Image (cartoon, coloured by chain):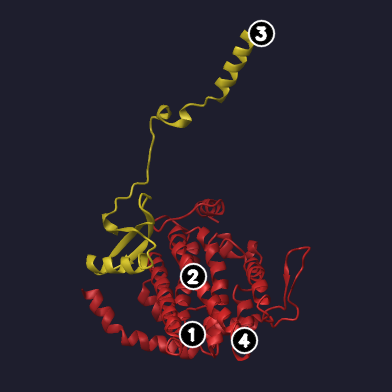
Amino acid sequence: MPEREQEFLEYVQGGGQVEAGDWMPDEYRARLRKFIEMHGNSELMGVLPEREWILRAPTLQRKLALTAKVQDEVGHAQLIYRVVEDLGKSREECLDDLISGKSKFHNVFHYPTKTWGDVGVIAWLVDAAAIISQKALLKCSYAPYARIMKKICWEESFHILHGRDVILTLMNGTEDQRGLVQEALDRWWGPLMQFHGNPIPTDEDPMFIWRIKSQGNDEARQQFLDGYVPQIWELGLTVPDPELRKDEETGRWHYTEPDWDELMSVVTGHGPKTEDRLDLRRQARENSAWVRSVLLAA
Amino acid sequence: MIYEVFRQERKGQAFQHAGSVEAADERFAESYAREQYGRRGESVALWVVERGSIMRIEEFVDELNRNYHRVDGYPLKEKLKEARERAAARDR
């Protein structure tokens, strides 16, 4: 490793942060850009499963809340793509690569939302899993990204409340409503356990080595289990994993090994809803092309 | 054009860099900044400034090592220790 790169590595490992105009090694820039771009893609694609339920929301209040959440998530995509642009890739290029399937987005957004129970589970638990990753990014070595994460985490924190409110309302309702939540939890548990990625040790994870991420994948998953399994259990819901238990001595959760093949297949574009959602994104982009051209010509 | 956005969370607090927006002109920059950084009442004020208008200064060379106008020009620990010892010796 060249000396300048070594110095940079030591700087970020010592907690140092980097600004957009600063020198950075090519590998760092490339990894950072790819990671942040995927985050932007996920925010943008993440609204599609929820968008499907705006017209079918059970009350006006829920419809408004869901619409506002969708608006927030698209806003996050805008903030994030702006950071990617400063790293040398335009938003148009990001969108090209997204709809052609060249770049990725998070596994959880490749699945269908079958019932209103799914909407609650997504807003509560998927957002909870996401906020754990995002809070760890507040310490990202790339400062412009860390700064926008502050706003993003702040908004996600009330998305979780919205999700929890949806779930609690259903759990206080009829047997059928509780059934919807349990079924949705059964459907989402697998993807939720895959969400933080395979348990690669931090000293082998380039994202940790460059301090783009400040925690390891399994650490994030443990934090998720620690925070949310008790909340799931106290509502009388069952987590569909017979192996799931906390070792009180080590403080670690045991669980059935998540299906890493499924994760790999889904994020490389073979999820049950991947094609539909990318089609919708493609159409939306074509339909709004005239707006972009008018705005840019202003 | 890129506009940098600085936001103030509460009256009296310092403005902090929040992020940036891309806009064709100032009118759009204003509405994007409002939308992305003020929609939820998370800011009481924003400064929106075209990136090229920001002067960036990063080198602070101290050729003459003028430490007399900085805190590190006054290492008192050793001197204080000696003074205390002298005072104690005088009292004896």
Q: Nearer the viewer, residue A79 or B34?
A: B34
> With respect to residue A22, does A270 lie above or below?
below
Which residue is under mark 3? B92
Question: Distance between the Cα atoms at labels 3 and 2?
Answer: 69 Å
The residue sitting at 39% across, 81% down in the picture is A96
Q: Identity of the amino acid at label 3?
A: Arg
Can residue B85 be seen in this snapshot? yes
Q: Residue at x 39, y 68 (%)?
A: A79
Q: Residues within 10 Å of mark 3 (few under 14, many from 20)?
A: few
The reply to whether the C-beta atoms of the residues labelled 1 and 2 are less than 8 Å apart is no
Relative to A186, B1 lies left or right? left
Q: Distance between the residues labelled 1 and 2?
A: 19 Å
Kindly indicate the quadrant of the structure image that contains residue A266.
bottom right
Residues under numbered marks 3 and 2 in contact, where contact means CB atoms less than 8 Å apart: no
Asked where in the image residue A251 lies, by quadrant, the reply is bottom right
The spot of residue A19 in percent (x, y) is 42, 56
A143 and A13: which one is in front?
Answer: A143
Which structural element holds mark 1? helix
**The hue in which chain B appears in the rendered picture of the protein:** yellow
User: Helix, strand, or loop for circle 3?
Assistant: loop
Residue A229: image location, x then y, percent = 66, 73
Mark closest to the chain's N terminus, 1 or 2: 1
Q: Which residue is located at x 53 percent, y 24 percent?
A: B76
What's the CA distance linking mark 1 and mark 3? Answer: 84 Å
Chain of the residue on which disc 3 is drawn: B
Asked if marks 4 and 2 touch (Cβ < 8 Å), the reply is no
Q: Mark 4 = which residue?
A: A178
Q: Which amino acid does label 1 sit on?
A: Pro
Find disc 1 in the rendering and name its residue: A49
The residue that disc 2 covers is A158
